[in-house]
Amino acid sequence: MNIQEEMDRIFKVQQDNLENERKFKELGRDFINFQDDFYNLLEKYGVDSIDIEHPEFNKICNLRNKIFDFIENEVAK
């Protein structure tokens, strides 16, 4: 591999890394919005205010994560 090919390869890796960083930031925003909507929905239907002190907090978080993953997989199809 010559120097130009190596420089091109490094540039491509950097571009890929930047694109992945943008996706993760976007995904983070999507997750925060989803989390807020999810908690609001549960509270709308009678679940007590959801915070770290909620007796079912871990269950709620696991359910939230599974639903978010499901949606993310469906959108990626």
Image (cartoon, rainbow, N blue to C red):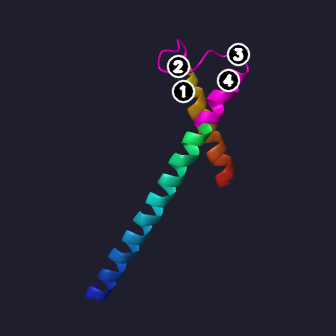
Mark 2 crowd level (few <14, some 14–19, many ≥20, 10 Å Cα): few
**Residue at numbered disc 1:** 61
Q: Is residue 18 above or below residue 39?
A: below
**Residue at numbered disc 4:** 42
Callout 3: SS: loop
Disc with the residue nearer the chain's start (4 vs 1) = 4
Q: Position of residue 21 (x, y in %)?
A: 44, 58
Which quarter of the figure has residue 43? top right
Q: CA distance from mark 1 to mark 2?
A: 6 Å
Disc with the residue nearer the chain's start (4 vs 2) = 4
Q: CA distance from mark 3 to mark 4?
A: 7 Å
Q: Which marked residue is nearer to the observer: mark 4 or mark 1? A: 4
Q: Is residue 20 above or below residue 11?
A: above
Q: Are marks 1 and 2 in contact (CB under 8 Å)?
A: yes
As for residue 41 lying within the magenta part, the answer is: yes
Callout 4: SS: helix
Q: Nearer the viewer, residue 4 or 35?
A: 35
Q: Amino acid at mark 2?
A: Phe
Tell me the number on the disc at residue 57. 2
Disc with the residue nearer the chain's start (3 vs 1) = 3
Tell me the number on the disc at residue 46. 3
